[in-house]
Image: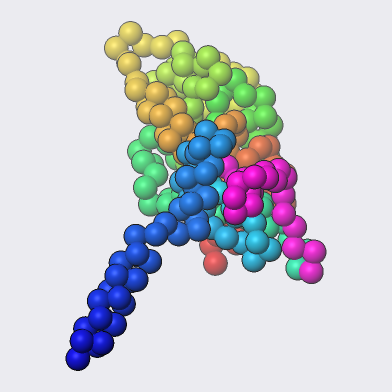
Amino acid sequence: MKKSILFASLLIAFTSLATAAPSDTDRVKVLVKQKMNIEATSARRLPMGLYEVVADRNLLYVDKDVKFFFAGHIYDITGQKDLTQARLDDLSRIDIKNLPLEQAIKTVKGDGSRNLYLFADPYCSFCQRLEHTLADLDNVTIYTFITPLMNSSAMVNRIFCAPDPAKAWDDWMINQKEPPALPKDCKPTTGDKNLVLFNRFGLEGLPTMYFDDGYRLEGAMGLEEIEKRLNSAKK
């Protein structure tokens, strides 16, 4: 009887210690903070023995004791896949349902059955180039979050205060036709709100596009790539 009680006590003590002991991933996060002064949001052990550490939507790879830091991308040679890029794509995804669509200019082309969510600045040359590409899209609804990233607040406000903001946006981005002067009684805050949204998503540049599956695509991409993502997100 005494042996049974002793064994049970030892088992409880061992279980408590195991529970209290930090996991390998927690230990790696602590070491990354101590040695690299980086606040890790998560860490996980990869099949090849390295630890993937996520910090502010960025990835880094370390050994279990954080003695070595590995920079660059990890590739699966057999599967011919960039594992790092695939992980970054996952980390950059957003829940489209949380997008405040009332802050966007809505443009419907054809039946509008596919959705594209665009962050762009009126002074961004790459954004202007992308607009020429988007003009060739059909059967899509485009939600444009005009974001004053390039000292463009005055122009952004003029576009939002125009009688037809969508037309004012297209006229400027496609034909460089300036919108009307800013009315004295119009003081929009939408541009500032979009800039807050831009920072919340951790975006670094424009243009940036999102799709219904939350996938993010950056830069003035070609029509083929955009069509591919639109069709993929619709499935």
Position of 9 with respect to 74 (left or right) is left
Residue at the far front: name it. Answer: 2
Is residue 125 shown left or right of residue 79?
A: left
Residue 38, visible in the rendered structure: no
Residue at x 46% of width, y 31% of height: 199
- At 71% from the left edge and 43% from the top edge, which residue is drawn? 71
Identify the residue at image location x=63%, y=49%.
62
Colouring chosen for the image of the structure: rainbow
Region in magenta: 58-78
Q: In front: 36, or 196?
A: 36
Residue 43 position (above or below residue 148): below
The percent position of residue 99, horizontal first and vertical second, equals 39, 44
Can see residue 148? yes
* Front-lying residue, 214 or 32: 32
User: What is the x, y in percent for residue 156?
Assistant: 47, 20
Q: Nearer the viewer, residue 124 or 51?
A: 51
Q: Is residue 95 magenta?
A: no
Question: Residue placed at 49% from the left, 22% from the top?
Answer: 148
Residue 3: x %, y % from top left: 26, 87
Location of residue 85 with respect to 118 vertically, above or below? below
User: For residue 178, what is the image quadrant?
Assistant: top right
Q: How many marks?
A: 0
Vertical order, 131 against 225 (above or below): above
Counting from the top left corner in percent of width and height, residue 17 is at: 35, 64
Taking the magenta stretch, the answer to whether it contains residue 77 is yes
| Residue farthest bottom in this picture | 1
Quarter of the image with the N terminus is bottom left
Q: The C terminus appears in which quarter of the rendering?
A: bottom right
